[in-house]
Image (spheres, rainbow, N blue to C red):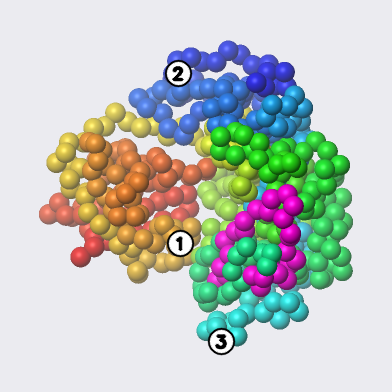
Amino acid sequence: MIGAVMMASTPILSACQPASAITQRADPDAFTDQLRGRFSYDGQVERHTLEDRMAHYGVPGVAVAVIEGGEVIYAQGFGVLQSGSDQPVTADTVFSAGSVSKMATAMMTVNLVQSGLMELDADIRQALPYWSPEAGSPYADSPLTVRMLLSHTGGLNLHGFPDFMPGEALPTRAQTLNGQAPAKHDPLRVEARPGMSYRYSGGGYTLLEGLVAQVSGASFEDAAQRILFDPLDMTRSSFANPLPEDHANIAKAHDRDGAPTALPRGYEAFPEMAASGLWTSANDLGRMTAEMINAYRGQSPYLHPTMGQEIMTPVAPSEHGLGPRLEGRGDGFLFHHGGANNSYRAWMEGHLGTGDGLVVLTNGANGNDLAVEIRNAMNDVMGWTVNPVLDIPPLVLSDAQMARYEGVYALDPNFPADLQMQMARPPFTSDLTIYRENGALMASYNGGQSGARLVPIAPDRFYITDFSLRSRAFELKFNRNSLAQITSVRAFMASAETVYLPAS
């Protein structure tokens, strides 16, 4: 139960309501009984209370911050630090931020570039004494730069890292980069030509971690305090891992059943600090998100407008700028990043055209699903337009119509990689199988097993509802010629797209 620490709200809407019913800007507190999914059916949207959805997803604690016009106007905690306790989550409770840590690292890095202590486009392959590209690699002589590391275009492996439980030995940075025990992963390697492809790499951010420490002359934790936390008044944030228990007001870890885990301490450690080791609060992360917005808009004392805009400029073929993921244009131009360690989920976003934004921190392994519904609710009550309800029309296709689309489709090798962005990696690089199951059209990347349902929005266009991610919907368009033959399938997701061709 979270009633004692949750702001008062109006009763739950027990029935569905028209999608257009929430149109007037309201106080952020109103989001607590307006949680919704991404889609509406026949113009109806089912809404829920925050308390009910926290119980449904097994997430005991959540903290939210709202930014408007480049300022944090609302920060609030809900629920408890640990299931079974009565210690409330507040706006100053610290959560593990997962890969949102990369945004703090990016801000530090760009600030050092602005100060002349780092260069965006200098070759850094030999900068660290304890790591260099693998001898004999076909890409060992290709320059590797800070811009590539920030944008995940360095051709590097190591998407992410396993968490460390209480009592486990933690690797040094050198052990992390070289895949040496007690690290739990392979060495960091350059597996594709740097600058030519998009490969999300937490390992690349561990290289940045070493570079930041080296040029600042301090440990990464101390550098973060001086370069980022102090200037932005992020008084509760830390890269210490394991986080000392006397830091206090720490949201504890929970598994997918909502049960406490990582006991007896109650939370894991994340020694790959730059990639996933940030502990932060809604207040602090809200301030940093607001600073990123203001830097882009030329209103930040922390970053010059040129650097603020550089962060928000996509680096092809990635979906990222110098750190954040980017999508949209005009008032819908936004940046965002999620975080997912074993037992925590985090989300941050900024609307660059309007100066608005949102932060969500959760202490449960199912926190992604909860954060999506919170984001949807806040979109509605604040009058934002970046995450509208997607209407599913009452369109029913016959078996004969659905049969036209069945088959296997292979990725078009000639489609430009810089347009594919996140679709230039698995599972999107596998064959797309379209098949029928239980009277519905399904899509799968593994040969017809565990597929996702296709929902028709026109006779030739479909949403893949199960693949619809935080700030984007996955859509397929089938192209047919005058002989009613499928000639190609175009897939869209946010700013990314790709094309599949019928397999021979």
Q: Residue at x 74, y 41 (%)?
A: 264
Q: Position of residue 444 (x, y in %)?
A: 33, 50
Residue 248 counted in the magenta span:
no
* Residues at marks 1 and 3, CA–CA distance in whole angstroms: 25 Å
**Amino acid beneath label 3:** Gly
What number of labels is visible? 3
In front of the other: label 2 or label 3? Answer: 3
The residue to which callout 2 is attached is 17
Task: Residue type at mark 1: give it.
Answer: Arg
207 is higher (above) or lower (below) than 478? below
Please state the extent of the stretch shown in magenta in the rendering. Answer: 154-180
Which quadrant: the C terminus? bottom left
How busy is the neighbourhood of tag 1: few (under 14 within 10 Å), some, or many (20 plus)? some
Residue 173 pos. (x, y %):
73, 67
Q: Secondary structure at mark 2?
A: strand
Q: Is residue 174 magenta?
A: yes
Disc with the residue nearer the chain's start (2 vs 3): 2
- Left or right, 181 with reference to 403: right
Q: Nearer the viewer, residue 145 or 90?
A: 90
Say if residue 113 shows up in the picture: no
Residue in the image at 75% along x and 24% along y: 86
Q: Which residue is mark 1?
A: 425
> Could you give the CA–CA distance between mark 2 and mark 3, rounded to whole angstroms?
63 Å
Q: Earlier in the sequence, mark 1 or mark 3?
A: 3
Residue at point 51%, 28% (across, down)? 36
Within the image, what quadrant is residue 398 found in?
Answer: top left
Q: Position of residue 354 (x, y in %)?
A: 64, 40
Q: Residue at x 83, y 47 (%)?
A: 244
**Location of residue 259 in the rendering, given as x and y in whole percent from the top left corner:** 62, 34
Dot 2 or dot 1, earlier in sequence: 2
